[in-house]
Amino acid sequence: MTQHPAVPTSFLMLYVAGRTPNAQRALENRQRLIDATGGEIAIEIVDVSIQPDKAEAAGILATPTLSDESCHPARRLIGDLGDIDQVLDYFGYRKKG
Protein backbone atom coordinates (compact mmCIF):
# COMPACT_ATOMS: atom_id res chain seq x y z
CA MET A 1 0.00 0.00 0.00
CA THR A 2 1.45 3.36 -1.04
CA GLN A 3 1.25 6.11 1.51
CA HIS A 4 0.47 9.51 0.01
CA PRO A 5 1.68 12.73 1.61
CA ALA A 6 -0.96 14.57 3.57
CA VAL A 7 -2.79 17.43 1.94
CA PRO A 8 -2.78 20.43 4.27
CA THR A 9 -6.15 20.88 5.94
CA SER A 10 -5.22 23.94 7.99
CA PHE A 11 -3.35 27.09 7.16
CA LEU A 12 -1.43 29.30 9.55
CA MET A 13 0.54 32.48 8.97
CA LEU A 14 4.07 32.99 10.26
CA TYR A 15 5.09 36.64 10.48
CA VAL A 16 8.86 37.23 10.61
CA ALA A 17 11.08 40.28 10.14
CA GLY A 18 13.95 39.82 7.70
CA ARG A 19 16.79 37.40 8.29
CA THR A 20 17.40 37.96 11.98
CA PRO A 21 18.41 35.04 14.21
CA ASN A 22 14.87 35.00 15.67
CA ALA A 23 13.37 34.86 12.18
CA GLN A 24 15.70 32.03 11.14
CA ARG A 25 14.77 30.00 14.25
CA ALA A 26 11.08 30.60 13.55
CA LEU A 27 11.51 29.39 9.96
CA GLU A 28 13.29 26.23 11.17
CA ASN A 29 10.53 25.61 13.72
CA ARG A 30 7.92 26.18 10.98
CA GLN A 31 9.28 23.17 9.13
CA ARG A 32 9.40 21.13 12.35
CA LEU A 33 5.71 21.94 12.95
CA ILE A 34 4.74 20.90 9.42
CA ASP A 35 6.73 17.68 9.75
CA ALA A 36 5.28 16.92 13.20
CA THR A 37 1.73 17.01 11.80
CA GLY A 38 2.60 14.89 8.80
CA GLY A 39 1.95 17.83 6.51
CA GLU A 40 -1.61 18.43 7.71
CA ILE A 41 -0.89 22.12 8.25
CA ALA A 42 0.54 24.66 5.85
CA ILE A 43 2.28 27.70 7.23
CA GLU A 44 2.58 30.71 4.95
CA ILE A 45 5.52 33.02 5.62
CA VAL A 46 5.02 36.77 5.68
CA ASP A 47 8.19 38.84 5.97
CA VAL A 48 6.93 42.08 7.50
CA SER A 49 9.97 43.98 6.23
CA ILE A 50 8.87 43.15 2.66
CA GLN A 51 5.08 43.08 3.17
CA PRO A 52 4.35 45.57 5.96
CA ASP A 53 0.82 46.07 4.63
CA LYS A 54 -0.08 42.43 5.40
CA ALA A 55 1.26 42.75 8.92
CA GLU A 56 -0.59 46.00 9.46
CA ALA A 57 -3.86 44.59 8.11
CA ALA A 58 -3.55 41.62 10.47
CA GLY A 59 -2.60 43.80 13.44
CA ILE A 60 0.80 42.17 13.94
CA LEU A 61 2.87 44.15 16.43
CA ALA A 62 5.76 41.74 17.14
CA THR A 63 7.67 39.00 15.36
CA PRO A 64 7.88 36.13 15.12
CA THR A 65 4.15 35.58 15.37
CA LEU A 66 2.34 32.39 14.37
CA SER A 67 -1.31 33.11 13.65
CA ASP A 68 -4.43 31.09 12.91
CA GLU A 69 -6.57 33.65 11.17
CA SER A 70 -9.38 31.22 10.37
CA CYS A 71 -11.00 31.99 13.72
CA HIS A 72 -12.21 35.27 15.13
CA PRO A 73 -10.44 36.70 16.93
CA ALA A 74 -7.27 35.28 15.38
CA ARG A 75 -5.39 32.87 17.63
CA ARG A 76 -1.76 34.00 17.93
CA LEU A 77 1.45 32.83 19.50
CA ILE A 78 4.27 35.37 19.71
CA GLY A 79 7.93 34.57 20.23
CA ASP A 80 9.75 31.27 20.54
CA LEU A 81 8.13 28.39 18.66
CA GLY A 82 10.75 25.86 19.78
CA ASP A 83 8.51 23.71 21.98
CA ILE A 84 6.73 21.93 19.13
CA ASP A 85 4.38 19.96 21.38
CA GLN A 86 3.28 23.12 23.20
CA VAL A 87 2.74 25.03 19.94
CA LEU A 88 0.69 22.20 18.43
CA ASP A 89 -1.37 21.93 21.61
CA TYR A 90 -2.02 25.69 21.66
CA PHE A 91 -3.43 25.57 18.14
CA GLY A 92 -5.29 22.29 18.73
CA TYR A 93 -3.19 19.95 16.56
CA ARG A 94 -1.91 16.49 17.35
CA LYS A 95 1.55 15.21 16.59
CA LYS A 96 1.67 12.38 14.05
CA GLY A 97 3.76 9.26 14.54
Image (tube, helix red, strand yellow):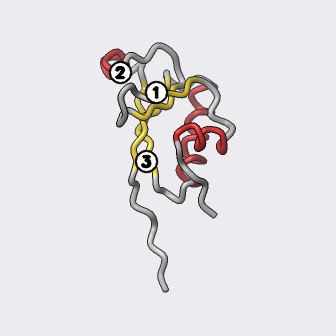
- Going 31% across and 18% down the picture, which residue do you hit? 57
Query: Considering the numbered disc 1 on the image, is that residue within a helix, a strand or a loop?
Result: strand
Kind of residue sitting beneath label 2: Ala
Query: Considering the numbered disc 3 on the image, is that residue within a helix, a strand or a loop?
Result: strand
Q: Which mark is residue 15?
A: 1
Kind of residue sitting beneath label 1: Tyr
Kind of residue sitting beneath label 3: Ala
Question: Eyeballing the image, is 38 above or below 26?
Answer: below
Q: Which residue is mark 3?
A: 42
> Does residue 56 appear to the left or right of 29 in the view shown?
left
> Does residue 90 appear to the left or right of 86 in the view shown?
left
Lower position in the chain sequence, tag 1 or tag 2: 1
Image spot of residue 85 (x, y percent): 66, 45
- Going 51% across and 16% down the picture, which residue do you hit? 62
Lower position in the chain sequence, tag 1 or tag 3: 1
Within-10-Å neighbours for mark 1: few <14, some 14–19, many 20+ = many
Question: Eyeballing the image, is 60 above or below 70?
Answer: above
Image spot of residue 68 (x, y percent): 43, 35
Q: Which mark is residue 58?
A: 2
Quadrant placement of the C terminus: bottom right
Query: Considering the numbered disc 2 on the image, is that residue within a helix, a strand or a loop?
Result: helix
Image spot of residue 4 (x, y percent): 44, 72
Looking at the image, which residue sits at the far bottom?
1
Residues at circles 1 and 2 in contact by the CB criterion of under 8 Å = yes
**How far apart are labels 1 and 3 at the CA level?**
14 Å
Q: Which mark is residue 6?
A: none
- Going 40% across and 55% down the picture, which residue do you hit? 8
**How far apart are labels 1 and 2 at the CA level?**
10 Å
Question: Eyeballing the image, is 83 above or below 72?
Answer: below
